Amino acid sequence: MAFGYLIILVVLAVVFALITGPLRGARHRRSDLGVTVADLEAARDAKYREIRDAEMDLRTGKLSEEDHREIDGALRAEAIEILHRLDEAQAEEATLAAEDEAEDEAARHGSDSELPSAP
Amino acid sequence: MAPVGRLLLILGFVTVLYGFGASLYGARARDEAWIHSGRRAMYSLALIAVVAFVILDAAFIRNDFSYNIVADGSSSTTPFFYRVAAIWATQQGSLLLWVTLFSGWSSLALFLTRRKMREVMPWAQATLFVLVGFFLALGTFFANPFETTTGPNTPTQGAGLDPLLRHTTMMIHPPMLYSGYTLMLIPFCFAIGALVSGRVNSEWVSVTRRFALGAWLFLGVGIMLGARWSYTELGWGGFWGWDPVENAALMPWLVATAYIHSIMIQEKRGMLRVWNVSLVLLAGVMAMVGDFLVRSGILSSIHAFVPDPTLDIAFVAIVSIMTLGSIGLVIWRYDSLKSEASIASIFSREAMFVAQNMVLVALTLVIFWVTFFPLISQAITGNEINVGQAAFLPFVDPLAVAIVALAGIAPIIPWRRMSLDKLRPNFAFPVAAGLVTLVVLLFVPGVTAHPASLAMFCAAAFVAATVVQEFVRGTRVRARAAGEAPPLALVRLVSRNRRRYGGYIVHLGVVIALVGVAASTSFQHQRRATLAPGQSVRSDGYTFTYVRPTAAATAQKLEFGAIMRVSRGGHRVTTLRTVYGVYPSVTSGAPLGRFFETNLGASDESTVGLDAGLTHDIWVVISANTQPLDPIINKGDAAFSRAMSAIAKLPRSQQGQKLTDLFQLRDRAVEELTDRWVTRPWPTSFLIEVSPLVTWLWIGGIIAVLGALISLSPVSPRRRRGDSDRGPGEVGRLLDRRRGTGAGTPPARERELVTRLSPPDPAA
């Protein structure tokens, strides 16, 4: 039975360490909102794939030249729009990262100044 | 160790409460640390569940009958292989298996999506905790697997595993089905998260697609294994009986099939958001209904556990909450879910997918209606009306043919639209394949008597030709563009378009399986015959001769078998062995009767004699009748009872030896009675079947599994870039409105588009 309680203790310790890990000493950062760079990159990749699919459909004889021209034009316009938004999101993310870093720096300086000075 | 197990369940429940609270707080406060902590609570729960499961399974393995479920569901004579699996043959053990699998799959889902959908995630986590908490609460407070009987009342032997479950496929069939059900709940929870958070774009669909496909795969494998078990173990001669529990697995599988196809429309075109979210919510509810049917026994089924009213109430409550909550959330978010794009042409892939979705959902609703008809009729008329297997077929047959036909049409047609002048060159080969099949089959005697099967064969030929055409054309384009040899081009074509070509392989596997189903059910020759050794009977041109009986008596079971020779035109085709097995009752007091009589609690099962081939299966099962032994057994029981009474009157010191002698005598009597089956055989009943193309059902299933694995297999990050399946999400919807604004594109971007989007090989 002692072995059984040892199991309980080990499981308890692991569970405690796991779930309190993110709360210990971490700055409680706000979760990201809005469309992220990763979202836009995924959107861009999906759009590229759609363009390739349309190209494949043309070459395998499913799409006529005329239909392909029209669909391909529309898809490329959409892809360009995504690329514009990706540029904006990357710039915004870089600004936020710089602000976060500045905040961290300020917090570090603040806590340093609270330390007792060496004798 | 039972108290440790109980403590672990309680610890698990506390972890669920914490995880739920942390996730909700993290969502409300938008605090990543709490959300992360909640996610880790799911990892912790998975760990706790695994440790608890191992403790319980160890009790089964070491025959610890102080555990009530070990005493009820296993015995020391149960082979090791089955003792390991006996845990999920019990209600309580299967609940723990469910919690273990659900927490494990949820942990995997949360880990893989930890950097995605940060708004959706905490709500999805909280919903996962609600559902896993529901099952854990049942297992902790109402169906505790760690209940024990200690002291002098501790059983020294268990009741043993149900003989029908002593089959290899049953070892993995329940974990497969449970994995399917639990995986199906993961997209459900993410859909709830998306609806609550308002992030109803395509992202959650893309992220959870693999889990829906995984659920589809596991449920499909579970269904096939169950069908195989039914075919080779149950002794009724079929693989699908439209049993409520079988249907319970089929319904979410059908909805998942619809969902896996319709999400492509949302990913590509940003359309069908209401439909997709409704489908995934329906699939989740269906998965829960499936588990409810297994556990409640509200509908009569050979696969269900013993009914438990407490669990019934709990399941009705959770299914109602899931259903009403889902409907409420969809109504609440209806405006955000509306799509701005629309289907441009009925000659487009999206239109075909919508049609296929309609048929799949119609099929699901028909199955649901007929399955639940006994309950519905009882609620309305007060009488339970069992409509049986025949009620399904008039609806299922035409809908199945329609689904197969659409599976052939959709891949040929491109997204958005197809010009009418492109119809003929694309449809010529598949339509010709279907027509040639029709013409050939019209000359086969008896085929026209089964129009649904005939239609299925033609539709299957059409789909198979479509798949071949897609592979050939794709390979040809790639080989020409990249200068590769055709075999290499084929391999690279599939490896770089796994989702598409894996899907085509699934189509091929499913239609092959359906051909097997249609042929074997429509053109099966079945015959019952009572034969004495040496006698013969004919079926479908084969002569079945009962050559001789066989018998065996072991501590575990008695076997009454038969050797059956099958010949055709005087030539031996095969020799089959079929066995009727009886497992002794552990509750009956009849010294001899408990070994033979099922009405005294003995369990029986059949081993089928099967000669499987690519063209047909020859299948035979014995239904041994031990009634001729009854007079001797009754006399023996009376004699042994008298002997027991006499021994009871002897001095205690003499009783031990006398009892040992008596039991040895009883064992000899059991052996001799069993031997009479061979030494003085009497006529016995056989069920004989010759079924065409059954093997193709299993081959088709294996092909479909391979296709699904190809679709699921991850693409390397290098290839994923620029070749991703991931959807456009919110951005795609916005872009639909702003189409055609690329005129002012900066030159650098234009250059990127030109260089990245015009590779010499589009198949790459």
Image (cartoon, coloured by chain):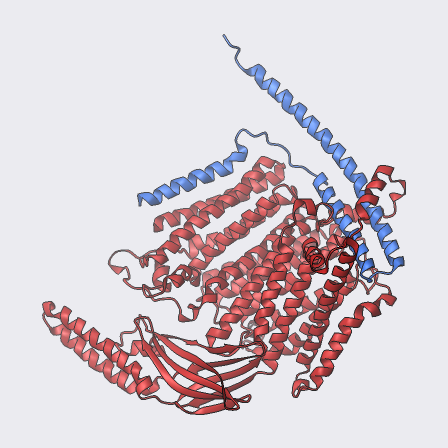
Chain colours: A blue, B red
In percent of width and height, residue B305 lies at 45, 66
Which quadrant holds residue B631? bottom left
Considering only vertical position in the picture, is A109 above or below B712?
above
Nearer the observer, B84 or B471: B471
How many marks can you see?
0
Judge left or right: residue B543 versus residue B253: left
Residue at 46 percent of width and 89 percent of height: B529
Considering only vertical position in the picture, is B3 above or below B169?
above
Residue at 61 percent of width and 69 percent of height: B700
Residue B259 seen anywhere in this rendered image of the structure: no
Residue B437 seen anywhere in this rendered image of the structure: yes
Residue at 64 percent of width and 71 percent of height: B512
Considering only vertical position in the picture, is B600 above or below B568?
above
Which quadrant holds residue A103? top right
Judge left or right: residue B578 versus residue B245: left
In percent of width and height, residue B204 lies at 67, 49
Which quadrant holds residue B681? bottom left
Question: As drawn, which residue projects farthest toward the top?
Answer: A119
In percent of width and height, residue B115 lies at 63, 41
Considering only vertical position in the picture, is A62 above or below B300?
above
In percent of width and height, residue B328 lies at 66, 54
Nearer the observer, B469 or A4: B469
